[in-house]
Image: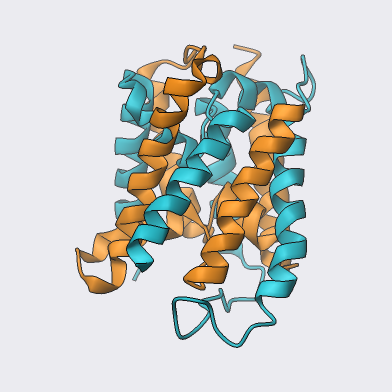
Chain colours: A cyan, B orange
Amino acid sequence: MSNLVALLLGLIFSVGLSVSGMVNPNKVIGFLDLFGNWDPDLIFVMGGAAGLNLIMFRFILKRKNPLLGSDFHLPTASQVDKKLILGAILFGVGWGIGGICPGPGLANLFTLKAEPIVFVVFMILGMLTFKFTSK
Amino acid sequence: MINALIGGAIIGLAASLLLLTLGRIFGITGIMSGMFSGFNKSNIWQYMIVLGLILGSAITSIFMPQFFQYEFKTSLPLMALAGFLVGYGTRLGSGCTSGHGVCGLPRLSIRSLVATMTFMISGIVTVFIMGRF
């Protein structure tokens, strides 16, 4: 049951990425092009997503446990550290160069275009490099 | 703008429902990294989310092909570099646009606020510099 729900929610999230324009690298780069021909649309994507969650999360987290599990799994780290900042900087550089972040990278795979395939392969390599070099 | 808002709300809905049902944060790089520990009962849901992400856009393109009328303008070597930086950076920084932005901001997490502002600024600076070449 949990796995079917996960599949369905992955599908829904991907529909959202498609409709919102997040899958389109030119739109993302247009949004990041603050000092050029700026396209503000992605503010509304983040506003719509985070805004809805701001309300929903309040109600959901009042529950003792999730519907299909025993506990909520929430991040526990609270310190802003060098790793967080440096990681976000590197991610931002990659996002600016390619115009896609991880979700849209996966959502673009079905097009079988070379760019998202190369992006996702190297993204996984980057993740594995981190995994095997940190501690 | 309307599409952006509707698409954003759909993304938010999926993230809210994942928290409600499985009690999990919809952070895509976190979910992907969970797959590296092999394939077992406890992480099948992560494979399922990734599969859903790959298929959801494909299904969307059948009914609404207008959302996929674009070409990538970044060269393949630069896409490789971009992918590597995104993969390494999101693990080092504990999250990407979905984990820190879509889910962390609504949780009023200071870490996510700092991360989101940092990758936005870093992306803006990168596009500014790339535009000069």
Quick check: A45 above or below A127?
Answer: above
Q: Is residue A111 left or right of residue B41?
A: right
Q: Residue at x 70, y 59 (%)?
A: A53
Quick check: A78 above or below B132?
Answer: below
Image location of residue A47, percent across then percent down: 77, 45
Q: Residue at x 78, y 20 (%)?
A: A38
Quick check: A10 above or below A97?
Answer: below
Is residue B85 visible to the viewer in this orientation of the structure? yes
Image location of residue A52, percent across then percent down: 74, 54
Q: To which quarter of the image does residue A105 belong?
A: top left
Image location of residue B13, percent across then percent down: 62, 53
Task: Name the image quarter holding the N terminus of chain A.
Answer: bottom left
Quick check: A52 above or below B132?
Answer: below
Q: State the count of labels.
A: 0
Q: Is residue B59 left or right of residue A99?
A: left
Q: Residue at x 64, y 53 (%)?
A: B102
Q: Residue at x 63, y 22 (%)?
A: A27
Nearer to me, A98 or B66: B66
Task: Name the image quarter holding the C terminus of chain A.
Answer: bottom left
Q: Is residue A99 left or right of residue B110?
A: left
Is residue B106 visible to the viewer in this orientation of the structure? no
Nearer to me, A121 or B27: B27
Q: Is residue A78 left or right of residue A103?
A: right
Image location of residue B121, percent across then percent down: 71, 40
Nearer to me, A83 or A1: A1
Q: To which quarter of the image does residue B105 belong?
A: bottom right
